[in-house]
Amino acid sequence: MATIFEAWQGVLTRIRTAAATSGRPPESVALLAVGKTFPPEALRELYAAGQRDFGENYEQELTAKAAALADLPELRWHFIGPLQSNKTRNVACQAAWVHSVARLKIAQRLAEQRPEHLPPLNVCIQVNVSGEASKSGVAPAELPALAHAVTQLPRLRLRGLMCVPEPDGDDERLTAQFATLRRLKAALQHEGLALDTLSMGMSADLEPAIREGATIVRVGTALFGARTNPDRNPDKE
Ligand SMILES: *Cc1c(COP(=O)(O)O)cnc(C)c1O
């Protein structure tokens, strides 16, 4: 079995290769290591290798791991799971990024609860690009109003858009969904919003995501291995 370090090298190579094939500089795509269900020690190992950005889906797990890894000064936490309004406070205090904002009320709470002494919280709006009724994320038609409202909030910085495409789409369908997110971002930029982030692509589909312009890929399985816990649906809480 590959060590975590070897897996990390392998994922970085996949990212570099996909960027190169798309004519993009390798440093234009950042790796977010998604550690959900894995113990803090596994994340610590990746930090020692040089990984700095870590993603979590569940507020309780984020809080526990942030405490366990509080001695790692350069570690940045990204919250990527569905967020309920009674769970925003710890996230507002601990995370550097929230990728999964899909309602104005949640953004307002994060803005109110973001401590004054910390830099603004970077946020992405999660968009439901697959149209599946069960999916988290704002509908594309409602995105512009939400995006403009979020940019008005203090202590938040709207960076871009995030999506989780339908799980068993073929390459063509995935590509179409990633392209939708890219076009939605371009349309908001055209309306004057300064966005620089497309958070899309996971272990199985980071190549098509990078072809369509991903700037952050969120990778769990390819780094840490298969999740053995009965995997809670990543898109539900
Ligand atoms: C779990 C999860 C990931 C990572 O998925 P893998 O397929 O394990 O790479 C990325 N994004 C979100 C929102 C997730 O819940």
Image: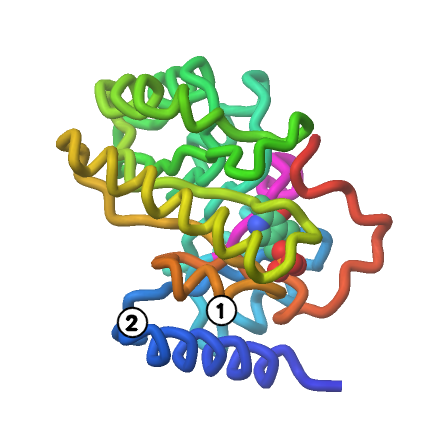
Q: Is residue 67 visible?
A: no
Viewer-nearest of labels 1 and 2? 1
**58 is within the stretch colored magenta:** yes
The magenta span reads: 54-65
Residue 230 place in picture, x, y as percent: 86, 49
Compared to residue 153, the image places residue 67 above or below, namely below
Q: Which residue occupies the foreground of this view, 10 or 49?
A: 10
- In this view, the residue farthest toward the left is 192
Residue 27 is labelled as 2
**11 is within the stretch colored magenta:** no
To which residue does mark 1 refer? 207
Name the residue: 69% across, 33% down.
236
Q: Is residue 212 left or right of residue 56?
A: left
Name the residue: 37% across, 60% down.
74
Element marked by disc 1: helix
User: Which quadrant of the rendered structure holds the N terminus?
Assistant: bottom right
Residue 69 place in picture, x, y as percent: 54, 56
